[in-house]
């Protein structure tokens, strides 16, 4: 497990730095659908009531536009036009969190803070040949919205997603299941799962 200090989290929350999403979401029906079965009242009460979301994509993460099978970089993303890949990855997390937050679920209020460690998608060359994996790593921490104090130890999340290649990738695009759609849906599901897990001191 990656060891990480709380300094970046406290600074982000207390100074309201980085990108953010505030509560709302699509309500309990979608949130409950993110996990098998239904949740008991005790399970709901033990989960955080996420009122806001912050995401940090550190400038130290190296992005690559090389169209090789496996660029050696931290950020590889082709689901948006060429541009600021750090900002694009942050926007993916923001949209995913907006879908995952259910304002009427959870017990103690919390701000969820995500810090991206790795977001390695597939290049054009890989996607339209052999395919691969969207390798996604981030640290998730829940903090008190007033004090910025951590409510539980940080969680290191591994959210990999298969990236079909060749004709399968072309067919997914034809059906509207673009890279951006698939990855955003997957991140929304992943965050939804984490938002429904109990806070463990």
Image (cartoon, rainbow, N blue to C red):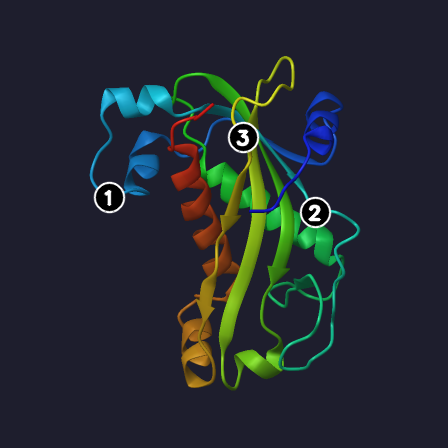
- Give how far apart the Cα atoms at labels 2 and 3 are: 20 Å
Which tag, 2 or 1, sits closer to the chain's start?
1
Q: Which of 92 and 60 is in front in this view?
A: 60
Mark 3 surroundings: few (<14), some (14-19) or many (≥20) residues within 10 A: some
- Give how far apart the Cα atoms at labels 3 and 1 are: 25 Å
Q: Which of 119 and 165 is in front in this view?
A: 119
- Please give the name of the residue rendered at 20% of the width and 39% of the height, measured from the top-left corner: 37
User: Disc 2, disc 1: CB below 8 Å?
Assistant: no
Is 2 rendered above or below residue 52? below
Dot label at residue 153: 3
Image coordinates for residue 3, horizontal then vertical, percent? 63, 41
- Give how far apart the Cα atoms at labels 2 and 1 are: 31 Å
Image coordinates for residue 13, horizontal then vertical, percent? 68, 25
- Please give the name of the residue rendered at 41% of the width and 78% of the height, measured from the top-left corner: 171
Q: Which of 181 and 59 is in front in this view?
A: 59
Locate residue 123 relative to residue 175 in the image: left or right: right
Residue, disc 1: 36
Element at label 2: loop
Image coordinates for residue 31, horizontal then vertical, percent? 35, 36
Which tag, 3 or 1, sits closer to the chain's start?
1
Nearer the camera: disc 3 or disc 1: 3
Residue, disc 2: 57
Q: Quadrant of residue 142?
A: top right
Nearer the camera: disc 2 or disc 3: 3
Element at label 1: loop
- Point out the residue furthest to the top here: 146
Image coordinates for residue 77, horizontal then vertical, percent? 64, 65
């Amino acid at each position: 497990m990656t060891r990480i200090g709380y300094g970046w989290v406290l600074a982000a929350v207390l100074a309201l730095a980085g990108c953010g999403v505030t509560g709302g979401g699509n309500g309990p029906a979608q949130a409950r659908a993110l996990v098998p079965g239904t949740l008991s009242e005790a399970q709901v009460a033990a989960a955080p009531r996420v009122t806001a979301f912050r995401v940090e994509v550190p400038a130290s993460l190296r992005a690559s536009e090389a169209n090789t099978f496996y660029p050696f970089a931290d950020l590889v993303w082709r689901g948006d036009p060429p541009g600021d890949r750090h900002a694009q990855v942050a926007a993916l997390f923001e949209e995913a969190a907006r879908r995952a937050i259910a304002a009427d679920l959870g017990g103690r209020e919390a701000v969820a803070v995500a810090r991206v460690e790795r977001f390695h998608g597939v290049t054009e060359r890989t996607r339209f040949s052999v395919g691969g994996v969207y390798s996604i790593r981030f640290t998730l921490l829940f903090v008190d919205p007033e004090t910025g104090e951590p409510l539980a130890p940080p969680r290191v999340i591994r959210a990999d997603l298969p990236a079909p290649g060749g004709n399968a990738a072309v067919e997914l695009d034809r059906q509207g299941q673009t890279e951006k759609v698939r990855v955003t849906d997957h991140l929304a599901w992943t965050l939804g799962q984490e938002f429904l897990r109990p806070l463990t001191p």
